[in-house]
Amino acid sequence: MSESLLSCPAVRRAVRLSVVVSLALAASAPASAEEVRDAAHRVAGEWKKAGAEVSTLAPRFLYDDDSATVVLPEPKGACVSVAIVGARGMSFHAKIAGASEDPLVDEPGRSSSFAGVLELSRCGNAPKSFVVTSDAGRGALEIVVAWSKTPAPQLRAVLPERTGGATAPPQDPGLLPPLPPVERRADAAESRAKRTGGEVLTRSTQRAGVDGSGTAPVELDEGCHVVEVFAAEATSANGKRRARLDLDAELRDDEDSLLAKDRTESPDAHLEVCVGEPTDPEVV
């Protein structure tokens, strides 16, 4: 597995960027793959505790814009719940066979992923299959199916770190604390990569344009990779913060195909991708 850490700003001024690339040892299992399997096992365990008949299906590997039809086990209850778990950087959607295609229809048999997870549910008129399609990124998807008298517990209760958990009343958080410098955040990312068996490659630095956008080339060997992007905060002449830093990034190959993207509200961007051959994409 290879990890890349990259800095690109979303603020509207030129800033210095820092890129760190790490290559994981071939014998070590990718940390993201282990996290995906652990999340799926947690879902299966919680659904079993709720009294559901649970099946864990064979993982499905999807490429960007790839689709797969998954056949469901024989019905063992009035309601079926399906959890699909992938890497946080993947984006995908799924639809139970027979569910409405109209996006304006409130249809529990159709769902899009959030932070690499989605759930489908239906009671009555048991479906025989569903189709899952990758929107961005590529990787393995773990699939858990539960049959029960009533819908299984929602994923927001099982995987709160992925789904955000229960919605709390809004509160005024006050002023945001200043972000650590880019170098310190990149150092921390390198340390995380090393702890999971990664071999950190040379960190590179880029400069964004005046509009806050920029590109940075990375070299990826065959295997799975993580690219993390960092940028400095914009400050005024007296050192005060100008605005909250929200950094978005995409990883695209030489044919401009989207390999991974991060559109979450965060000062750093996290991209995960698996490639079958040496690739020289760009972070944009």
Image (spheres, rainbow, N blue to C red):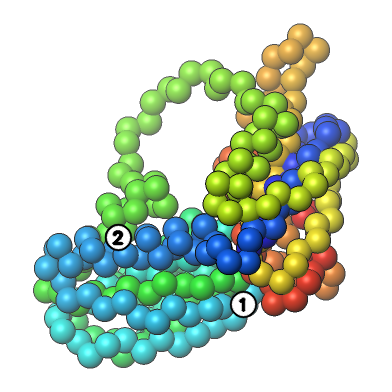
Q: Secondary structure at mark 1?
A: loop
Q: Residue at x 26, y 67 (%)?
A: 44
Check disc 2 and give the amino acid type. Arg
Q: Position of residue 111 (x, y in %)?
A: 42, 69
Q: How far apart in space, not on screen, are marks 2 and 1 (Cα)?
A: 25 Å
Asked if residue 191 lies left or right of residue 95, the reply is right
Q: How many marks?
A: 2
Q: Position of residue 10 (x, y in %)?
A: 73, 39
Residue 233's disc number? none
**On screen, 129 above or below 161?**
below
Residue that lies at the very extreme toward the front in this rendered image? 27
Q: Residue at x 78, y 71 (%)?
A: 278
Name the residue carrying label 2. 42
**On screen, 223 above or below 20?**
below
The quadrant in which the N terminus is found is bottom right
Q: Is residue 104 visible?
A: no
Check disc 1 and give the amino acid type. Tyr
Q: Position of residue 97 (x, y in %)?
A: 38, 86
Residue 63's disc number? 1
Q: Is residue 58 visible?
A: yes
For the residues bearing labels 2 and 1, Cβ distance under 8 angstroms: no
**On screen, 188 above or below 36?**
above
Asked if residue 107 lies left or right of residue 263, the reply is left
**On screen, 256 above or below 78?**
above
- Give the class, few, some or many, for how many residues have Cα within 10 Å of label 2's Cα (few <14, many ≥20): some
